[in-house]
Image (tube, rainbow, N blue to C red):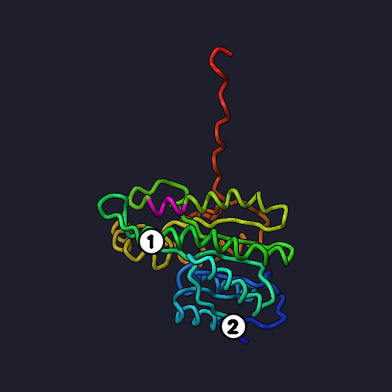
Amino acid sequence: MSVVEDDVVARPGQTDGAPLQGKVAVVTGGAGGLGRATALTLAKAGARVVVADLDARGGREVADMVGGHFRACDVSDPEANRALVDYTLEQCGGVDIALLNAGVATGCGLGEDFDLARYRRAMGANLDGVVFGTHAVLSALRARGGGVIVATASLAGLTAVPLDPLYAANKHAVVGLARSLGPALAAENVRFNAVCPGFAESRIIDPLRGMLSEQELPIIPAEVVADTVLRIVTGDGTGECWFIQPGRDPEPFRFRTVPGPGRPAGT
């Protein structure tokens, strides 16, 4: 028996109020912030949770809270992602849900402050982590007859971000993956969606807290993002990118359609 936050107890065989009973979820970046909140939320909903992170202390703490498992994982390494899925299969017998959430701030721009190591680190965590995580988990989802992948993108994947164009670039890429893989995987009963929060409670906004406070911009509680992930997991949509903003109900972003070809001149 394991206790999660708010004195909610996860009991074997529980069905009432547990829409994910019998499901297995993998959460990368699960040691803190959005990943931690989502691991707790999925566990409360009945899922067995495997927490993955480079922060072993924080990750084990969350795993203990939900009565789950912890696996150290560098999501920028394809082999580490495969090892994470193999570990989950060994411990839990399958995978039904994957939250590909690990991410970092860029820490540099494209001018004189450009730093190749920081660029590679950001792309490795924010984009490669989603690509490699998806590649690693697909066979396990197929073996269960289908499942759900949710990638953590950002509002930065839906709009221009002049202050951090590299972060916007990798988050736009995650949005593109979600929109494309959703229909591509639908025939296999695998759903792929993304969450796109604004400034949400996590370590990634630590350098921005002063600015957010000065401009009186509210910070989105991590639990709001976690609840949105649960809505996506228990829903039936695919290829969707859910925006999350303070004071608004999260919902799929409505993209404009691409203009079709015009008529040749003189016809």
Position in image of residue 92 (x %, y %): 66, 78
Q: Farthest residue to the top: give it.
A: 266
Q: Amino acid at mark 2?
A: Gly
Badge 2 or badge 1: first in the primary sequence: 2
Magenta run includes residue 93: no
Classify mark 1: residues with Cα within 10 Å, few (<14), some (14-19) or many (20+).
Answer: many
Amino acid type assigned to the residue bearing label 1 in the image: Ala
Q: Is residue 169 magenta?
A: yes
Q: Residues within 10 Å of mark 2 (few under 14, many from 20)?
A: many
Q: Which quarter shows the C terminus?
A: top right
**Res. 67 mark:** 2
Q: Is residue 218 visible?
A: yes
Q: Quadrant of the N terminus?
A: bottom right
- Residue 193 is labelled as none
Give the residue pinned by disc 1.
105
Secondary structure, mark 2, is loop
**In this picture, is 8 found above or below 253?**
below
Which one is in front, 224 or 115? 115
**Which range of residues does the magenta coloring cover?**
166-171
